[in-house]
Image: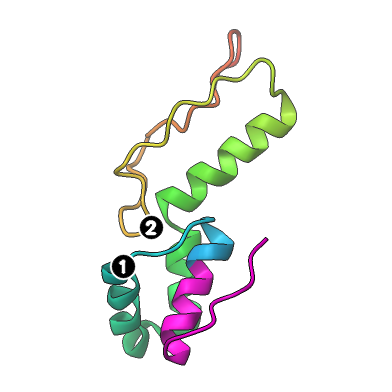
Amino acid sequence: MKTGVPSGSANSRYVQALYEFLVHRAGGAAEVAGWVGALPAAGRQGAALGFLDSGEFRTDELEAYCNALSPASISSPARSSSATVDAPMQQGASAGCERPGFTE
């Protein structure tokens, strides 16, 4: 059960909350610091959009949809270490929702 982010500046708590609630993990110190540093230019909405547009978020969401649709027939490969919030999914990359007879 998540209890929120109890310490740090308001901006670091906000960024850490984005990590916890959108990509379901704690952000590393360098990751949080990077986003906190980007907040003056991007704003909080821009930071949230950065998370929602990340390969890590999209991969997690796609895997959840695939598992909900047909958990027995869908393979779920391990997440690539390159699919993180600061590394958007490359164009045309597959997130692992392949089934026999299913075409994109």
Indicate yes or no whether the magenta region holds residue 5: yes
Question: Would residue 39 be found to the left or right of residue 14 on screen?
Answer: left
Tell me which segment is drawn in magenta. Answer: 1-18
CA gap, disc 1 to disc 2?
9 Å
Q: Quadrant of the N terminus?
A: bottom right
Dot label at residue 31: 1
Q: Residue furthest right?
A: 69
Q: In this rendering, is residue 85 above or below 47?
A: above
The 10 Å Cα crowd at callout 1, few under 14, some 14 to 19, many 20 or more, is: some
* Image quarter of residue 73: top right
- Quarter of the rendering containing residue 89: top left
Position of residue 36 relative to residue 54, above or below, is below
Q: In the image, 81: left or right of 18?
A: left
Q: Position of residue 53 (x, y in %)?
A: 46, 58
- Nearer to me, 54 or 9: 9
The structure residue drawn at horizontal position 55% and vertical position 61%, both measured from the top left corner, is 22
The residue nearer to you, when weighing 29 against 11, is 29
Q: Quadrant of residue 97?
A: top right
Q: Position of residue 86 (x, y in %)?
A: 32, 59
Name the outermost residue toward the top. Answer: 100
Q: Which residue is mark 2?
A: 85
> Is there a contact, CB below 8 Å, between mark 1 and mark 2?
yes
What crowding class fits label 2: few (fewer than 14 Cα within 10 Å), some (14-19), or many (20 or more)?
A: many
